[in-house]
Amino acid sequence: MPNNLPPLAVTGATGALGGMVAQLLAEQGIPLRLLARHTARVPQQPDTPTFAVSYADKEHAERALRGTQTLFMVSAAESPYRAQDQRTFVDAAVDAGVRHIVYTSFMGASENDVFTLGRDHWDTEQYIRERGLEFTFLRDAFYQDILPSFVGRDGVIRGPAGDGRFAPVARTDVARAAARILAAPVPHARRTYTLTGPQTLSMSAVAEILSRVTGQHITYYAESLDEAVESRLAAGASQWQALAWATSYAAIATGEMDRVTDDVAELTGTAPVSLEDYLRSDGKSSS
């Protein structure tokens, strides 16, 4: 493999977040290499090498990362094996000589996170630390663009969020923050940023905003945790999926998501977009 490849690598290049970050960096003229599971779907950019990479395949990942100094690591797709696969990829990065990983984590990630998938993020954060890498962790709130998918066919959002509040963030704001860090990563080493939208909302308030924007009558029904798990199992979800889905709402109910930060504005120079403004723009830039 040639040794003159760009020292900045971006994973998830075919995904919404990784693709936006890659585009923002390319617009600044920053050389980079793109990693994705399926390179045929990677948008073609001049003088930008692409590599097919699976987080679970250490050998191929290590080859793709050789010569990389800074790595933007988008968290892997949700699965029972995500934590282990991400450890494998971090090992590949270390063996390839990567110095700094910018990792997309989740707001409130902890060893005993109510949201079961938040524990995967915590595991990856700790493993990156253990392997001695420089790091920047982007702990994102729930993405605004996924909220319309929470609405059932009957116009009801169901889940055990109670009256808890959270501050959903636009994926475009996360991408802008990530691109700013990746363009000059050294000042952000060993920093953790919590990226939120500009206001906290209850799930009932989300339903009201969706109703206003879409013209449909959308409401929220607060399930119990047991009800939520059983309803997802009945719909065909596996046990881990049902528990992950239900506890994502439960984390809101506990209050651990009830926080707004200035990190997006401090990193990018502009305030984060609100949920209603995002929806009224049709989410074109984040879809």
Image: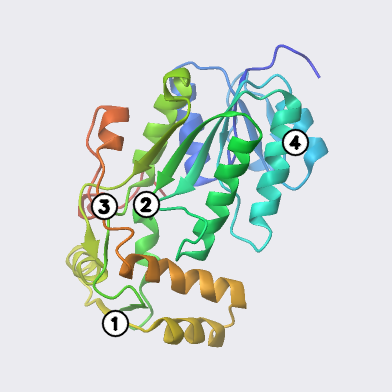
Can you tell which of label 4 and label 3 is closer to the viewer?
A: 3
Q: Is residue 54 visible?
A: no
Spatial CA span between label 4 and label 1: 44 Å
Residue where numbered disc 4 is placed: 61
Q: Nearer the viewer, residue 83 or 274?
A: 83
Residue 12 image point, x, y percent? 58, 41
Mark closer to the chain start, 3 or 2: 2
Can you tell which of label 3 and label 2 is closer to the viewer?
A: 3
Label 1 SS? strand
Q: Residue at x 20, y 52 (%)?
A: 199
Identify the amino acid type marked 2: Ala
Label 4 SS? helix
Mark closer to the chain start, 1 or 2: 2
Residue where numbered disc 3 is placed: 259
Identify the amino acid type marked 1: Tyr
Residue where numbered disc 2 is placed: 141
Spatial CA span between label 2 and label 4: 28 Å
Spatial CA span between label 1 and label 2: 22 Å
Label 4 neighbour load within 10 Å: few <14, some 14-19, many 20+: many
Q: Indicate whether 97 appears above or below 205.
A: above
Structure colour scheme: rainbow
Residue 220 image point, x, y percent? 27, 78
Q: Residue at x 73, y 44 (%)?
A: 88
Residue where numbered disc 1 is placed: 221
Can you tell which of label 1 and label 2 is closer to the viewer?
A: 2
Label 3 SS? loop
Q: Nearer the viewer, residue 124 or 42?
A: 124
Label 1 neighbour load within 10 Å: few <14, some 14-19, many 20+: some
Spatial CA span between label 4 and label 3: 36 Å
Labels 4 and 3 touching (C-beta < 8 A)? no
